[in-house]
Image (cartoon, rainbow, N blue to C red):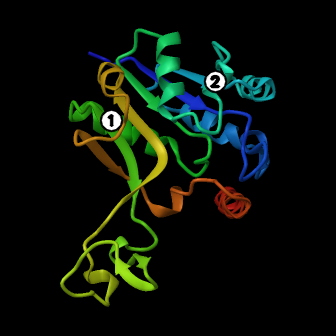
Amino acid sequence: MKQSILAIIPARGGSKGVPRKNIKNLAGKPLIAWTIEEAKKSKFITRLILSTEDEEIIKVAKQFDCEVPFTRPMDLAQDGTPGIDPVLHAIEQCPGYDYVVLLQPTSPLRTVEDIDGCIEMAIKHHANYCVSVTEPEYSPFWTYTIENGYLNPLIKQDKITPIRQDLPKTFKLNGAVYVAKVSAILQEKSFINSDTKAFIMPTNRSMDIDTELDFEICESILKKRRES
């Protein structure tokens, strides 16, 4: 039986790191367009919608043929709004789906293969949750806090391993794809728990735009990708 899947692109108007970043031109098109276009290629997504409070973002999304069935309430578009709240609101506004997929527009390097790979893993394993991860640039085994001026290892070890290849493999959330059964997320109100499957993505498709430097790096990568 085919699963019905609602995909949500959350894109509020406010942004401190890169002002108006969701509609800022990135390698020839608005940032949000990169996510819309890849999501529309998915063989699993039943319905793709945008969640925003911003009229200009709505206009841009519609130009790229993305449905905007509602305007997000302002109290769900603040700096301190938990990321899960707009997802729960969207599910409430668009009920009747088996799975929900969260696609943040700040991951423009993510491809439809990543989106469908994460969805497929969730369905294949009958998982309540599946999220995309990647290997971190720096191992947490080489990370420290400082207490009274002295280094304090974040992860306690009997002996510091000097060679990166000898360290245990670790992974971090990359923010690109979040998948959940609707029934499960309405109950847990989180994509991350002990029941979450990991979908591993390559580092070169895992950048999350938070600063102007991130934006410039992504633009360079996308231009090279287009040329090749």
Residue 145 point in image, percent of width and height? 42, 75
Q: Is residue 91 visible?
A: yes
| Residue at the image point whose x is 47% and y is 31% from the top | 84
Tag shown at residue 199 = none
Screen quadrant of the C terminus: bottom right
Residue 21 point in image, percent of width and height? 74, 45
Residue 125 point in image, percent of width and height? 21, 35
Tag shown at residue 75 = 2
Q: Judging from the image, what secondary structure is the residue with disc 2 in?
A: helix
How would you rate the neighbour count of disc 2 (Cα within 10 Å): few for under 14, some for 14-19, many for 20 or more? few
Q: Which of these two is toward me, 147 or 163?
A: 147
Screen quadrant of the N terminus: top left
Q: Which of these two is toward me, 193 or 25?
A: 193
| Residue at the image point whose x is 64% and y is 13% from the top | 70
Q: Amino acid at mark 1?
A: Glu
- Mark 1 — residue? 120
- Left or right: where 53 falls relative to 3: right
* Quarter-of-image position of residue 194: top left
Q: Is residue 43 above or below residue 67?
A: below
